[in-house]
Image: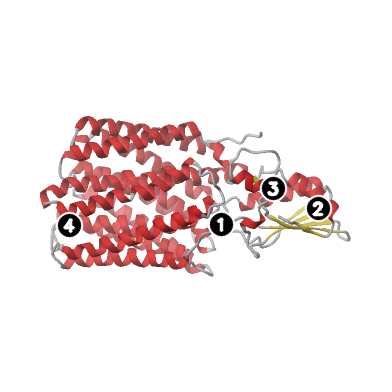
Amino acid sequence: MINAPSNTGLQQTTSYKVVLPFYIYAAISFLTACILLLLNTRAMHQHYFLPQTLAITHIMALGWGTMIILGASHQLLPAMIDGKLSSNTMAYLSFGFAAVGIPILATGFYLFQTGWLLQAGALLVNAAMVCYLVNVVSSIYETKKTDVHAVFIATAALWLFATTFFGLLLVFNFTRAWLPRNSVDYLSLHAHMGITGWFLLLVLGVASRLIPMFLISKYSSRKRLWWIYALINLGLLVFILLKLFVKPGLVFYVPVLLIGAALAGFADYCRRAYKVRLRKQVDEQLTLSLLSVALLLLPVLCLLVTMAFMSKNQQAHIVVLYGFCIFFGWITAMILGMTFKTLPFIVWNKVYHDRAAKGKTPAPKELFSEKLFRQMKVFYLSGFGLFITGLVFLNDILLISGAAALVLAALSYAGNVARIILHKPVSL
Amino acid sequence: MKVITNDQINCDKALGPLYQVYDPEIGLNVVDLGLIYQIDFLDDENGVEATMTLTTQFCPMGESIRNNVARSLSNTFAGFRITVNLVFNPPWNAARISERGRQFLNR
């Protein structure tokens, strides 16, 4: 007879039913974006404000990056706030609105139908982000204690909503000019609110907890994390104010330096955690995620080169490279690694929770194919390398072969995700 | 990785099968990992009360690991009332890992 203690002190995990749809949707989006990239490599020769480029960027930012991060954050939030997710219904609503809104928005961009199609997509995406924001804030409000990691997530959710709301304003500004300037002038503001406020803040907040956990490292420094948090938010706020009210000049280096200092602080945080790790052998999944931290250097380098040496005409070309390094480099490398550090556990808990100790069960990492993972990694790294070289030299052969390798990476990824999700219980 | 007990013979009997209960992420068993703090035997109630921890309070497999420990004890001590308490104070630390566990992690 086994007694269940009333309070185990364990975190309450979010149901897999809430989380899995986000992972499935993200895998499909990544594959779609890579196929579109392969079909539109010529667009990379042109200005970034091009229908195909805008469509691919939004599929990568929303369908791939945001959807998987929303899924993972619904799973991880209880652990971050020492409580539970406030509402599963809001999570389902968030998924539903985004799942319908993102393809509508992407189609609107691809066809450059700036009327109802784009507006409907943007409205649905905003509805999804409102649900997410309300869910995150109410989960934090209901809990007893909140730490720095939860503050990262809550602030990131606020920035996400600010980004999509500003995007909505830009979409309506296409058909009726009621903002002081045209929408293209505000693109970098919209993009950096999303890249820095949403992706960077959330990724650093979650990674600062997960990386030491997976390395079995006892390193932790709340003070350092608070500094990183302050530098990122200050950098972004300064950038927004400068962009709105000041003409381009040397002062624009200030936000770059602030955010650069935060990134250096985070890289050092990871280095310290790595140095005192107990687990000497770091698996390939975590290695790929750690590589993504290094890949952050590429967009920073692009940004500095652009600001220092390039005329406005040349900048458009580098902006494509900058965006590619962020979405297909940093964000994708991080997700490709972290998916296989989170999804197998979610599915393992679903399949084996009641079967544990009735017999030996496979380990979570046995739910996916290591061989397929390695194959994906090779395709991804070669595809990314070829494509950025193609972007630098504007070489079609390199662009096409890079995009083709990325399609193969996305297929390998989707295959492995399907393998995990469709896993049937086995006894060893 | 010293396990506190009021009955060393039965504790050793309990620990044997617990070497087969693994932390699925780390791949190391709960005994070598030092997760088991205490195992007491309650004669008057015919019960076994274990106290354990996890490497982190945020472990997504925590409930599963605790259940595995409970089922392992239940198999070893059939008919006994099994209670497994999960505590995070004192927190787990690396010093609790056995020599064999360290060798495993250093591979």
What residue would you read off at disc 2? B11
Q: Residue at x 38, y 50 (%)?
A: A293
Q: Are marks 1 and 2 in contact (CB under 8 Å)?
A: no
Q: Distance between the residues labelled 4 and 2?
A: 73 Å
How many other residues sit within 10 Å of disc 1, few (<14), some (14-19) or many (≥20)?
many
Task: State the image quarter where residue A151 is shown.
Answer: bottom left
Q: Which residue is drawn at 53% across and 52% down?
A: A277
- Label 1 sits on a secondary structure element that is loop
Look at the image and tell me whether residue A21 can be seen: no
What residue would you read off at disc 1? B58
Q: What residue type is labelled 1?
A: Phe
Q: Are marks 4 and 2 in contact (CB under 8 Å)?
A: no
How many other residues sit within 10 Å of disc 2, few (<14), some (14-19) or many (≥20)?
some
**For residue A338, side relative to residue A216 (left or right):** left
Residue situated in front as seen by the camera: A25 or B36: B36
Mark 3 or mark 2: name the one nearer the start of the chain.
2
Q: Which of labels 3 and 4 is toward the front? A: 3
- Label 2 sits on a secondary structure element that is helix
Tags 3 and 1 on a common chain = yes
Q: Are marks 4 and 1 in contact (CB under 8 Å)?
A: no
Q: Do the residues labelled 3 and 2 touch (CB within 8 Å)?
A: no
Q: Which of labels 4 and 1 is toward the front? A: 1
How many other residues sit within 10 Å of disc 4, few (<14), some (14-19) or many (≥20)?
some
